[in-house]
Amino acid sequence: MAAFILRRLAQSILVMLVVSLVAFYMFQFLGDPINQMVGIDTPQAEREALRERLGLNDPMIIRFGKFVMNAAQLDFGLSYQHKQPVVDLLMERMPATIELSLVSAIIAFCLALPAGVYTGLYRHRWSSKALLTLSLIGISIPTFLIGILFIYLFAVILGWLPSFGRGDVLTLPGGWTTGLFTVSGLKAIILPATTLGLFTLTLIMRLIRAEMLEVLRTDYIKFARARGLTNRAVNFGHALKNTLVPVITVTGLLLGNLIAFAIITESVFQWPGMGRLFLQAIQEVDLPVMSAYLVMISFLFVVINLIVDILYYVVDPRLRVEGHGGGH
């Protein structure tokens, strides 16, 4: 177990170095950040002094080395546009993005699990076929269009829910802000969380259905039925348990996707999260914010994948047997 975790940690560090290099190098061609920081009448001497102070005249390899060393200490420098530490800007908006992604994942998984099991067990019923047809909506329609339709229906026509913003938030000990304890905050998160989680919901539902159909055809399920076990015991005690093993991996990866691709949802609903900050940074050529955002999102992906790998190792005994047998 320890060797497995150490091997995964080494792989994670290598991935982070590669991602950091790509993120750092890619944004060097988006334009001159000095033009965004000063006015058009700023003398050339002041521009050069500012460029020198920010280290923009250093060779690329030195700048990248400084970036990695500082990033390891959560020091991403100052935002060119906001004139504040980048880490403060990200930490200020991270609770909103994490909260939105987690609520989306909970909605998606809580709805996908019963829907996937039902459509797997009763695949010939018309209700199962109707659920599968509806699930195509979540896959086929772009997220921004679903968000706009939700706003039009539930905010404009019905007036039940707010169309933008995060509502009232409370500050918990440690500086973490949340809207889950206020009425307006709960109302505000329903539409964006549902919009963001719809794609994930359909994928998990179809995955669970496919796994259920596969497991129900195996010999040990037939043997369990031959022993006289009830359908409830066979379906939920044997089939569902084995179905969830691959679902753990996919759900973990999808949670990372929710965090990374919340940008579009945050833009549609004007959600004050990291995604909106990243889009603003692109418009303003704020290189430190863009690089830091990608590195932090990649770090979240790596951490989630690491946790998923460890859970998979714990849940699936075959991996432990392979590990002890030297990978044969």
Image: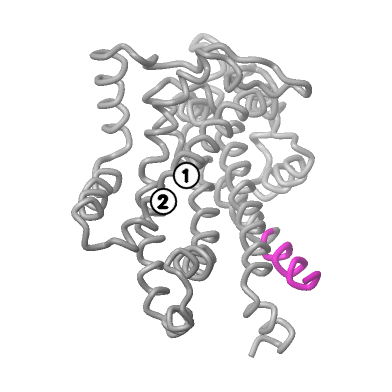
User: What colour-coding does the image apply?
Assistant: one colour
- Decide if residue 150 is in sight here: yes
Q: Residue furthest top?
A: 41
At 66% across and 69% down in the image, what residue appears?
313
The residue identified by callout 2 is 114
At 41% across and 49% down in the image, what residue appears?
112
> Could you say where residue 240 lies in the image, as x and y percent from the top left?
48, 64
Gap between marks 1 and 2 measured at Cα: 7 Å
Quarter assignment of residue 208: bottom left
What's under tag 2, amino acid-wise? Pro
- Decide if residue 48 is in sight here: no
Q: With respect to residue 102, does 121 lie above or below?
A: below
Q: Quadrant of the N terminus?
A: bottom right
* Mark 2 crowdedness (10 Å alpha carbons): few <14, some 14-19, many ≥20: some
Horizontal placement of 147 versus 111: left or right?
Answer: left
Horizontal placement of 40 versus 323: left or right?
Answer: left
Query: From which residue to which does the magenta span run?
Result: 1-12
Q: With respect to residue 221, does 154 lie above or below?
A: above
Q: With respect to residue 93, does 312 lie above or below?
A: below
Badge number at residue 110: 1
Of residues 223 and 127, the one nearer the viewer is: 223
Of residues 182 and 260, the one nearer the viewer is: 182
Horizontal placement of 55 versus 43: left or right?
Answer: right
Q: Are marks 1 and 2 in contact (CB under 8 Å)?
A: yes
* Mark 1 crowdedness (10 Å alpha carbons): few <14, some 14-19, many ≥20: few
At 37% across and 56% down in the image, what residue appears?
116
